[in-house]
Amino acid sequence: MFKKTALAILIAGTSFSSLANWVGGVSYINLSDDEDGIDISLSGISGSLGYKIDSNTNFNFIPEVRIGTGISDDTVYGVDVEMDSFIALSVRGQYSLENGVYLFAAPSYANVELTASYGGYSETDDSWEFGIGGGAGYKFNESTSAEFMYEQYDGTDVLSFGVKFDF
């Protein structure tokens, strides 16, 4: 269902390309969870696409979708754990300062699909969770910025660092 919704949003957005306030990006992400003495840390890479809703102030809303995949796994008690996919839908509230720095907060709804493997057997599971995040970025020029973000989903910490491009 999500894939169909994302495709519909992208198709609908192409008709508005003349009103371009699109923001795309790529980020390194790290998911970590430490529960009941079990510490898991997974990393991945994600791409994002959002649309900046302009206002007459330094404050903007940016609905955004992020889609990613794992690039490293972790082993816990002999069980190999890997991230198959990461999907997040969020609406970012962003405030731009005069010096190129911007601050943002974003409630999100995210899904992580994980596979656990041991001795030739594997099990895949995924779950959707609500979370909240925030971060800061620096705009190098009119179209390029770098940013850091921290998010929390039901005990799982997500740190990301990436670049954004306005087009």
Image: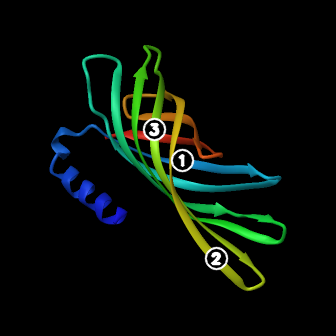
Q: Which mark is residue 123?
A: 2
Label 1 or label 2, whichever lies nearer to me, is 2
Q: Position of residue 121 (x, y in %)?
A: 70, 84
Q: Residue at x 54, y 31 (%)?
A: 135
Q: Position of residue 74 (x, y in %)?
A: 75, 62
Residue 73 shows up from this direction: yes
Residue under pointer 1: 27
Label 3 or label 1, whichever lies nearer to me, is 3
What is the secondary structure assignment of the residue under circle 1? strand
What is the secondary structure assignment of the residue under circle 3? strand
Residue under pointer 3: 107
Looking at the picture, which amino acid does disc 1 mark? Ser
Q: Residue at x 84, y 67 (%)?
A: 77
Residue located farthest toward the bottom when viewing the structure as drawn: 120
Q: Position of residue 86 (x, y in %)?
A: 52, 58
Q: Is residue 99 left or right of residue 63?
A: right
Q: Residue at x 69, y 50 (%)?
A: 32
Q: Position of residue 61 (x, y in %)?
A: 33, 31
Answer few, some or many: residues within 10 Å of disc 1's Cα (few below 14, many 20 plus, some between 14 and 19). many
Instruction: Quarter of the image for the N terminus: give it.
Output: bottom left
Residue 85 shows up from this direction: no
Q: In the rendered image of this protein, does residue 15 appear above or below residue 105? A: below
Residue located farthest toward the top when viewing the structure as drawn: 98
